[in-house]
Amino acid sequence: MRFEAKVIAATSRDLGQLVREGRFREDLYYRLNVLPIRVPPLRERRADIAALVEALGEDIAQRSGLPQPEYTADALDLLAAQRWRGNVRELRNVLEQASLLGDSSRIDGARIAQVLRETGIEQLEAPLSVAPVAAEAGDPLRPLAEQVAALERRAIAAALQACGGNKVAAAKMLGISRATLYERLAELADLTV
């Protein structure tokens, strides 16, 4: 009997390096390495975390029968700041524990911090802040891009504060989509203004 098969394999190891070191079979490497697809680790895709949290939250709620969790702004900021060595699996594990840990479907930064500590993350990364810096306001001698970023940071921070951290409402208030707001938050967090 004849059959055709396609093998899809994933690894976090550098197979090319392992072949060079003689620790992985060269013939198998070339059979597997027909169409390599590199998926960057979650720590390189911080802008994706909010969307992943939403999608994973829906799945967790559906599987557990619990209401869909609602994450506060400080919870999302804390999640976006972590390194996620275990990638999406580690993120999902933390979200599941946070959902099952409390009595409320509202998950705040304190609950996320507690779960992160209990899962063995000894050094929590500080949340990315979008708080305005007072000295930025009146310095016209800085490059225009820095001034625009500072203004955008203040507008987003003010909208988030006015909406109690609700990013959907803040995005509506700013006249941008939720996805655009998440992108701006990620971009502004990476800037050193």
Image (cartoon, rainbow, N blue to C red):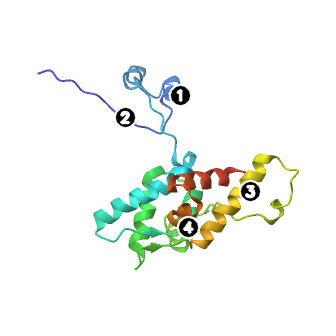
CA distance separating discs 3 and 1? 44 Å
CA distance separating discs 4 and 1? 42 Å
Q: Mark 4 points at which residue?
A: 73
N-terminal-most mark, 2 or 1 = 2
Nearer the camera: disc 2 or disc 4? 4
Q: Mark 1 points at which residue?
A: 17
CA distance separating discs 2 and 1? 17 Å
Nearer the camera: disc 4 or disc 3? 3
Q: Mark 2 points at which residue?
A: 9
The answer to which image quadrant residue 63 occupies is: bottom left
Q: Which mark is residue 181?
A: none
Three-letter code for the amino acid on which mark 3 is drawn: Ala
Q: Considering depth in this image, is 164 or 28 the residue closer to the camera? A: 164
On screen, residue 44 versus residue 144, left or right, reads left
Which residue lies at the image location 53% right of the left edge and 28% below the top edge? 17
Nearer the camera: disc 2 or disc 1? 2
N-terminal-most mark, 3 or 2 = 2
N-terminal-most mark, 3 or 1 = 1
Nearer the camera: disc 4 or disc 1? 4
**Farthest right residue?**
141
Which residue lies at the image location 86% right of the left edge and 57% below the top edge? 139
Q: Position of residue 143 (x, y in %)?
A: 82, 46
N-terminal-most mark, 4 or 3 = 4
CA distance separating discs 3 and 2? 44 Å
CA distance separating discs 2 and 4? 36 Å
N-terminal-most mark, 4 or 1 = 1
Q: Position of residue 165 (x, y in %)?
A: 56, 69
Q: Position of residue 75 (x, y in %)?
A: 54, 67
Three-letter code for the amino acid on which mark 1 is drawn: Gln
Which residue lies at the image location 74% right of the left edge and 52% below the top edge? 148
In the rendered view of the protein, which quadrant contains the N terminus? top left
Q: Mark 3 points at which residue?
A: 150
